[in-house]
Amino acid sequence: MIGFEYYNPAKIIFGEESEQKLEGLLADYGVKSLLLVYSGEFIQTLGIYDVIHSATEKLGIQLLENGDVVPNPSIALVRKLVALGKEANVDFVLAVGGGSAIDTAKAVALGIPYDGDVWDFFEKGINPGSVLPLGVIATTASSGSETSNAAILSNGDWKLGFEDDRIIPKFAIMNPRFTAGLPAYQTNVGIADVLSHLLERYFSDEKYSDTTDYLIEGAIRALLVNADKLLENQQDINARGEIQWLASVAHGGFLDAGRSADWGSHRIEHELSAQYNITHGEGMAIVFVAWIKYIATKKPWRAALLASRVFGIDAYNYSEEERAYALAEKIADVFHKLGLKQSLTELGIGTKDFAVMAARATRNGPVGHYVPLDATAIEEILTLAL
């Protein structure tokens, strides 16, 4: 086990009617001017908007809002909201929704106190002088951004991430009932996203991190059990609660303890979603299976371990490489049950842009820690994903 520091100050308010705690939370932070960031009309349908409006009205908080967030959020909207926030002296940002709304809010919280262009944080890795506080009302179970220190944005050509503990939300309100009205597809790509975060953390070259290994294996088991429950009954609120909590567990930093996660697959998918605007969870479902097939002949031991411990593939009868390939099949079966695409071909994606995407992904050197990937390796993985 390698040394580590774990820090996550996000206050989690979980359960039915947890949104009713919002007024007290805003009062605790002494909010005077709040920018609400969301996507579409669902916050009215779910009654969330009324809760926010009531809380801000009672506390005398100026409320500004924008509902223009889209999947794979763009820097253009962030720049617009930063300008609005500066003009209105916004001192708190509230995101309602999933990863796209939350990452947009994180970028806005970075940009309002900053004198330069907010894209500097993502492109140049600038250390922020200060960051506005932000909170979240989560309405999906997918990215885990509600308790993470990361944000992902696109400028149309590049999809880049930024990490800093100061963009961890101050609080995350999670009412599983808010996820019950999601279309099955959105629920299922969210499950794929959660699984991808667990897998990225499992694939570590650290051989002595048993506690974290077993925690991740248990989380994967719990995710698969509850995914099956939702396939039988989309309104199973207990299963939705388990998966919403797992989304945060998977990406809140705790499962990084004692190890270095891989993240090579995410770098590949970020290029795909930047190039083709595909849904991240579905992209990960395709890329991760191809990545496991690729590493099966390079360094199979981690995949073999997971295949045996979670999926029961006998270590005595099958080699590490065979178990790694078996894991790829098992993971593919999970995504197939979720009704997700199984190949880039099904998404209408061919080989034309493979070299360009591979070069972009590796512009600062190889990506991934368990098996470092250069541009040639990324093209091989994309080919396996066809």
Image (cartoon, helix red, strand yellow):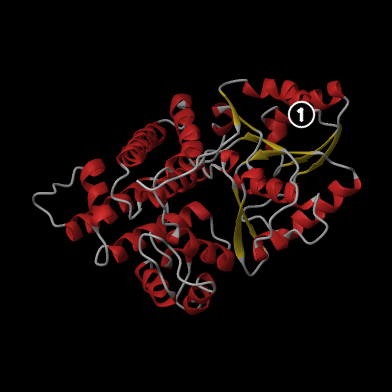
Find the residue positioned furthest to the front: 3
The vertical placement of 324 against 361, above or below, is above
* Spot occupied by residue 241 in the image (x, y as percentages of width and height): 48, 28
Kindly identify which residue carries mark 1: 29
Residue at point 43% right, 29% down? 239
Name the side, left or right, on which 226 lies relative to 114: left
* Spot occupied by residue 282 in the image (x, y as percentages of width and height): 47, 54
The vertical placement of 96 against 351, above or below, is above
Tell me if residue 68 can be seen.
Answer: no
The quarter of the image holding the C terminus is bottom left
Name the side, left or right, on which 150 lies relative to 21: left
* Spot occupied by residue 264 in the image (x, y as percentages of width and height): 44, 61
Amino acid found under the numbered disc labelled 1: Tyr
Of the pair 278 and 104, the residue shown nearer to us = 104
Disc 1: CA contacts within 10 A as few (<14), some (14-19) or many (>=20)? few
Name the side, left or right, on which 202 lies relative to 284: left
Name the side, left or right, on which 360 lies relative to 131: left
Number of numbered tags placed on the structure image: 1
Secondary element under disc 1, as helix, strand or loop, is loop
Of the pair 318 and 166, the residue shown nearer to us = 166
